[in-house]
Amino acid sequence: MTGMGVEVGAQAARSRALAVLRIRSRALAVALLPAAAAVVLIAGGTTGHISGGHWGVTRWIVTGVAVVVLLCAAGIALFVARARPAVSPTVQIAEDSAPDLYRMVRDLADRLDVPAPSAIALTPDCDSWLEDRTHRAQSPPAAESGDDTEGIRSLAGPRHGRLPVAPVLVIGSPFLWWMRVGELRAVLAPVVAGTGPSAHPDIAAARRFVRGLDAAVAVAAEPARGPLARTALAGVGWVTRLLLRSCRGHAAEMERGVAAAAAERAQAVDYGVRIVAQEQVGLAYAGWDRLLTRVALPAWRMGRWPSRLDAGVVAALTELSRRDRLAEGFTSRLGERPACDLLEEPGVVDEAASLLAARLFHGGPAECGPDWAPVGWQEYPDEVVDRTWRTDAARLHRVLDAQGVHVTTNPTTRDVDGPTLSRVLDHLTVTAADTNAAPAAPGGGRPERTGAAGPAADPADPTEPAADSTEAREHHDDEHEQHHHEGEDGDDGDRGGVGNGDGDEGTLGTERTATLAAGLSAELAREEAAAPVRGGGTEQTGPDRTLWDDGMLPLFPLQPPRSGREILADHVTAMICCAAMDTAGAIPGLDWLDGPTLLINGERAADLTPRVLTLIEDGDPTPLRSWLHHSGIRPEKPVRLV
């Protein structure tokens, strides 16, 4: 194999790599310059050509400076060499566990006339790339290398050999389950073609130098213990940042050249199929994002992690294609061989990738335990959806108890044993007394009401005619209905009848409604603070520590913190779902795109969101009570909570 072809991008990458190496040579020359001057002065004094006067003092000063500079340069070089470059968390795939996959990649490399990747790994993301793992700290320890790491044993070879080791091919795990074999081969062709330029000695050396500088900058930025260590790291960090800034432009252009050369070489392999396969890449990303944020995240919050996320993305994408009326085109392709058949045990690999996804996106432990157990899709409605709703409902009533709210606020109704939905509805309802007691707005305007985001104008001013108030409310309800219908077809669909809201803080019906939202937010914060820190299992520390620190998890948070309005809406909806399950025979369900959902008489309760928002924002329970009556839900009956 030639590896390094005659592509224009490859030649440009090599020229940029030489520019990076020249910067390294200049840094070395600067470090050796005082030593060269000291050698000249010492040689001149020995031979008598430079002697007498001030030359003796100059000779000793320059020699001392040269020794100090050499020691500093040696220390910085050792620091850069020992700094471990960043590496992506992946699931290693041994060759004996996926011989067909390794065979397909090697055949693809032969067709591209490039070196084959040294190993294959999976990542819980919709992307694929080549990753250099030749650093000695990234090689598996001899005591721990077994069948699971046999696929990367070649990486433990000598680092200073003439021929660099081929990089590791990292494949997004959703691609293996959603794509067909031909599509995966077409998508991987430009990635595998990148091993050709990577094998060139100049490009490999430039990459090692840049990655070493980047790792050294990261290590130097870590907080040090003593003042001496902080001073030394500050000096090392300044030098490495200076070198990294000098190399940044050339390194970026080098990588662009490598990518251009790989794309040009891959055009000769499955180019037509690749155009079609790129559509599946975008679809897989959309389905994977919806599955993580809507389905996996509620389970992770409950201490459960779905053990078949990659299999679930197939169901999510199939449902997405059905909703987008694209099922006819996808039905035929689903009959082809999926790429996951290239694995000997797809279930084991899927479970490992699912656990890694939970750790990266949520910060879960690295091992299973009593508070961190896997859950299958069949058990998801009972173990996740039902528990989530009842836990949220119990938290809602605890906050109501703490605020001194009675079981029922209706003086004509006798308190019943157990929490009821009527207690929540009565507390959130805006009465005539609440409206009359609202403080006037500054300047004599319309009255204000306090929400979680501050005072906001009341859409129904009691001083205006009744017809105007009714018209304003109907317009507000129409906006909620429109938002809900848009959510069914777009990316902001309702979450099991809950709805994700519009992401704004919004306004709340009364001051006690805002107080309830603030109490729920504070209770959630206390529970999160009191939760035990989820550690990283049995990983070692020191030179062979894990690929990331547990304190940095999650590396990629899925969602920003919820607002008080969103938290209140979720808890009220959870209480409604509990009442529906206990009084109307409803059951929890799972929607592959929207997550937890309520099933009443086998049908999804998709029209609950605007009614809940009307209650918490306007304090009007009429639409919600009408829906409850139509669905056969009795809010006065007590419900079972966690």
Image (spheres, rainbow, N blue to C red):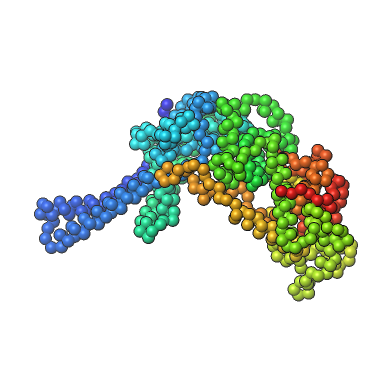
Q: Nearer the viewer, residue 582 or 17?
A: 582
Q: Nearer the viewer, residue 546 or 181?
A: 546
Q: Nearer the viewer, residue 368 or 563?
A: 368
Q: Is any part of residue 615 visible from this angle? A: no
Q: Residue at x 60, y 54 (%)?
A: 530
Q: Quadrant of the N terminus?
A: top left
Q: Residue furthest front?
A: 417
Q: Residue at x 41, y 28 (%)?
A: 2
Q: Is residue 211 left or right of residue 588?
A: left
- x, y (%) of residue 110? 47, 25
Q: Is any part of residue 444 visible from this angle? A: yes
Q: Is residue 263 left or right of residue 569?
A: left
Q: Is residue 583 left or right of residue 456?
A: right
Q: Residue at x 83, y 39 (%)?
A: 601
- x, y (%) of residue 351? 59, 35
In the displayed structure, would residue 41 be above or below residue 147? below
In the displayed structure, would residue 418 be above or below residue 404? above
Q: Quadrant of residue 590?
A: top right
Q: Residue furthest bottom?
A: 443
Q: Quadrant of residue 225?
A: bottom left
Q: Residue furthest left?
A: 48
- x, y (%) of residue 18? 37, 42
Q: How many numbered circles are shown?
A: 0
